[in-house]
Amino acid sequence: MSLKKINFITGHNWKSNRLGGFHKFAEAACNAGIEVVFFSFPRPYYSYFMHQELYNYKTIKELQKGIKYEVAGQSLTNITFPTFKLPNSANKILSDGMMNALERFSFASFKKFAKKWFDGTDVFVFESSDGMIFVDQLKKMYPNAKMIYRPSDPLMYDGALSRYVKNETHMMKKADLNIIVNQEGLDLYKRKIPDFDRTIKYTLLSNGVDIESYEKKYPVPELLQKGNTVLYVGAWEVEWDLLFKAADADENFNYIVVCPNYPSAEIQEKVKTCKNFFYVPGIPPKDVPAWITNCSVVMVPYVTDFYKNRPLGITAKYYQAMAAKKPIVAYCDTPKLTDAGVTVTYTYDDFIAAVRKAIEQKSCGYSFDLSERKWENITAKFLELIK
């Protein structure tokens, strides 16, 4: 099948220029001469009044008109479709069906919107985000187009809202192919969905990493010039109490958390009182290699027992640190990381002790073949799979 147009349905904007996932797939599609639509969803009407990178009046209005980019000589259009989606807290009062209906409902016609931007699409690729609620409408409007589900993180983790479990199960059954990123995710789906192997078409394809970007030298970011820097860069919440204790235990170590999801005001204020603990509300994706390669230790201090509900497997942040040959200390993540040479701890004291040891290492090698994780190889396999 010769592909002329692919629609990526994702929670991100193209402008955010992430170093992985759908940005890499879309870029590879453009390099292959394929037209790309980047459909950013959800963008609820109430987010007009927010002041976040993705959720603010100006950005959403620009996306409604369609933002045109040229990537490798090909057209890439980033668009959105605002709706009456409500915060998840409303699900305590409203049924799952009503929540989905409001999330689809808009002042504008979705059919007209789709006709304008989606006509000619050969493949719709859905991320594990709310955009999957349109799968039935899109299958009806574009019966000859393929529906591909590529979850970055499963939505039906233990304790997830029933609405997300139902929506994701429906998405996987409707998809022509589900591209799952790791064995942990596959095991979860098999546990959650009855007759999984009989009812779901799937394959495995891991995340990737730009190895070369993490082998280069960069100017040292100002905050990392302090020395003995223990760095986390990621979107998942961290175990703040652990880090406060660690910073207090070793005042000559500088703990740095880079995360776009703001912690509570109380935590932010407490961080300000610590002379060796710093919070940064996100950095441009293009700057991530400079931060990873210039820190002393990469830490991944997830919330206690987080890994038991979230089967993330070995994520891109580990690939990045491995490529940079940085010592890694994790807290409450999958024990499988130890097979690759990553130090994984499960108590506060063990984490603090492991960081002390890692600081002395300077650099570290890992028994993990990153060559198979190069994005150029992953994206080539992806495009072949969706044809």
Image: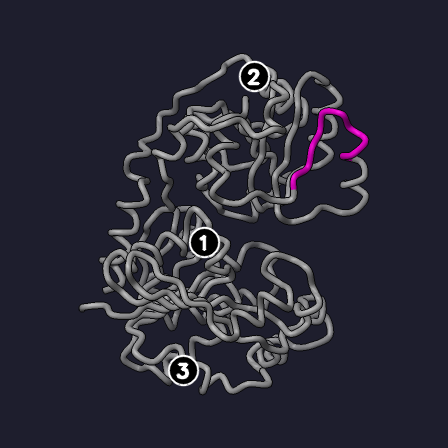
Q: Indicate the colouring scheme.
A: one colour
Question: Where is 42 relative to 216, above or below?
Answer: below
Q: Which mark is residue 116?
A: 3
**Residue 4 visible in the snapshot:** yes
Q: Are marks 1 and 3 in contact (CB under 8 Å)?
A: no
Q: Nearer the viewer, mark 1 or mark 3?
A: 3
Question: What is the distance, in whole Å, between disc 2 and disc 1 at their CAs?
Answer: 32 Å
Element type where label 1 sits in the image: loop
Quarter of the figure with the C terminus = bottom left
Point out the residue furthest to the left here: 1
Task: Answer with the quarter of the image where residue 122 lies.
Answer: bottom left
Label 2: few (<14), some (14–19) or many (≥20) C-alpha neighbours in 10 Å: many
**Residue 198 visible in the snapshot:** no
Label 1: few (<14), some (14–19) or many (≥20) C-alpha neighbours in 10 Å: many
Q: Position of residue 381 (x, y in %)?
A: 25, 52
Residue at 45% across, 87% down: 112
Q: Is residue 201 magenta?
A: no
Q: Nearer the viewer, residue 330 or 234?
A: 234
Question: Where is 184 relative to 360, above or below?
Answer: below
Q: Which mark is residue 359?
A: 2
Q: Nearer the viewer, mark 2 or mark 1?
A: 2
The residue at which mark 1 appears reads as 152
Magenta stretch, residue numbers: 271-280
Amino acid carrying label 2: it is Ile
Q: Which mark is residue 140?
A: none
Residue at 48% across, 45% down: 312
Q: Position of residue 178 (x, y in %)?
A: 35, 61
Element type where label 2 sits in the image: helix
Amino acid carrying label 3: it is Lys
